[in-house]
Image (tube, helix red, strand yellow):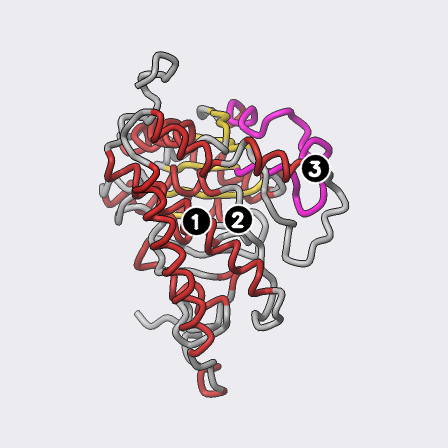
């Protein structure tokens, strides 16, 4: 450890945990970068909203979660899915609209879900996730599982009534719920500085009687520590927390967005703030991992994404018969 390296430089994580965190972030990045290229071919139906640049948030939060816990996502949900353990090949097939997809090709990019992993689903409804995790958190509380519910939502959703009502309900019922506001600066093309009345979304927490925390979304370890404290408190009966994660998304609101509303912020973020670059620098400086180990993960992830795309393109599409399946749940 160098003299300038803080004692908690890697938040007490061992080599295995650090490699797993890096693998998750790299998988999200490569998944999204490849989708950016594949969508341009015209083979992928529907809309695609990419999570590149935001990897540290989903990865650091979900690193504290297990099978007891559930998450709700947004329209920009690929990163949350991967971080919660949804199968990458099934995700790719779902985005291509194939029957081998996690939702049998019926959900597409904005509606990927896997309840077996505690992933309640990506959501095309802005602010649709927070009320859902109030339900799962209430169930966990009554069943005594120690589980928590985590809602990821954007700066646009922070202004939705559903989100504010969920924050209030979680506090009134003292639910084991974590609300993660992923503030990438824009609700579609509208700047958060123009549309959000307060300087920080987390400042709203005081109005609901819960802690509010602001973290650097480019710093995996900052998010990891904030999320760990909030999740531990929730498991122990301490109630909900609002965490605001601030960062920059590397692509437009959706694939095809001309991004005329921003200038060179993405180039600057990629060059000097990127979460993967910062992570590599921290773990190699601490001596816990070396470049060879990290490069090895890069190669393995590249192979996984290549295989996922190839298999998705070869998989069959749903038939007319499939229209009437998976419509109702049988109890």
Q: Quadrant of residue 265?
A: top right
Residue 199: % across, % down: 64, 24
Q: Nearer the viewer, mark 3 or mark 2?
A: 3
| Residue position marked by numbered label 3 in the rendering | 264
Badge 3 marks a residue whose secondary structure is: loop
Query: Residue at position x 48%, y 72% from top?
Result: 106
Residue 112: % across, % down: 45, 61
Q: Is residue 286 left or right of residue 46?
A: left
| Residue position marked by numbered label 1 in the rendering | 80
Instruction: Measure how far apart labels 3 and 2 are at the Cα level.
Output: 18 Å
Instruction: Measure how far apart labels 1 and 2 are at the Cα level.
Output: 9 Å
Q: Is residue 156 magenta?
A: no
Badge 2 marks a residue whose secondary structure is: loop
Quadrant of the snapshot with the N terminus: top left
Q: Nearer the viewer, mark 1 or mark 2?
A: 2
Of mark 3 and mark 2, the one earlier in the sequence is 2
Q: Nearer the viewer, residue 70 or 24?
A: 24
Q: Nearer the viewer, mark 3 or mark 1?
A: 3
Question: Which residue lies most toward the front here?
Answer: 292
């Amino acid at each position: 450890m160098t003299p300038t390296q803080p004692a908690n430089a890697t938040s007490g994580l061992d080599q295995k945990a650090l490699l797993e965190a890096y693998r998750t972030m790299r998988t999200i990045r490569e998944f999204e970068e490849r989708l950016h290229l594949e969508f341009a071919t015209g083979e992928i139906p529907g809309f695609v909203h990419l999570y590149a640049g935001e990897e540290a948030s989903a990865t650091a939060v979900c690193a504290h979660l297990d099978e007891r816990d559930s998450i709700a996502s947004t329209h920009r949900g690929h990163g949350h899915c991967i971080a919660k353990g949804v199968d990458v090949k099934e995700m790719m097939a779902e985005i291509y609209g194939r029957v081998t997809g996690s939702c049998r090709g019926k959900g597409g990019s904005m509606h990927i879900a896997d309840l077996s992993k505690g992933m309640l689903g990506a959501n095309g409804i802005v602010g649709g996730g927070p009320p859902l995790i109030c339900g799962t958190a209430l169930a966990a509380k009554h069943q005594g599982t120690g589980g928590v519910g985590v809602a990821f939502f954007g700066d646009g959703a922070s202004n939705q009534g559903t989100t504010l009502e969920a924050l209030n309900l979680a506090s009134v019922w003292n639910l084991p719920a974590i609300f993660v506001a992923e503030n990438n600066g824009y609700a579609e093309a509208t700047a958060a500085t123009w549309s959000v009345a307060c300087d920080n979304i987390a400042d709203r927490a005081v109005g609901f009687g819960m802690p509010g925390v602001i973290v650097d979304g480019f710093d995996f370890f900052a998010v990891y520590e904030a999320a760990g404290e909030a999740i531990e408190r929730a498991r122990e009966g301490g109630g909900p927390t609002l965490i605001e994660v601030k960062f920059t998304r590397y692509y437009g609101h959706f694939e095809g967005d001309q991004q005329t509303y921003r200038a060179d912020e993405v180039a600057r973020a990629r060059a000097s703030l990127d979460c993967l670059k910062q992570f590599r620098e921290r773990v190699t400086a601490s001596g816990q991992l070396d470049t060879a180990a990290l490069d090895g993960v890069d190669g393995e992830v590249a192979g996984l994404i290549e295989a996922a795309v190839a298999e998705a393109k070869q998989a069959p599409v749903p038939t007319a018969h499939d229209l009437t399946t998976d419509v109702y749940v049988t109890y």
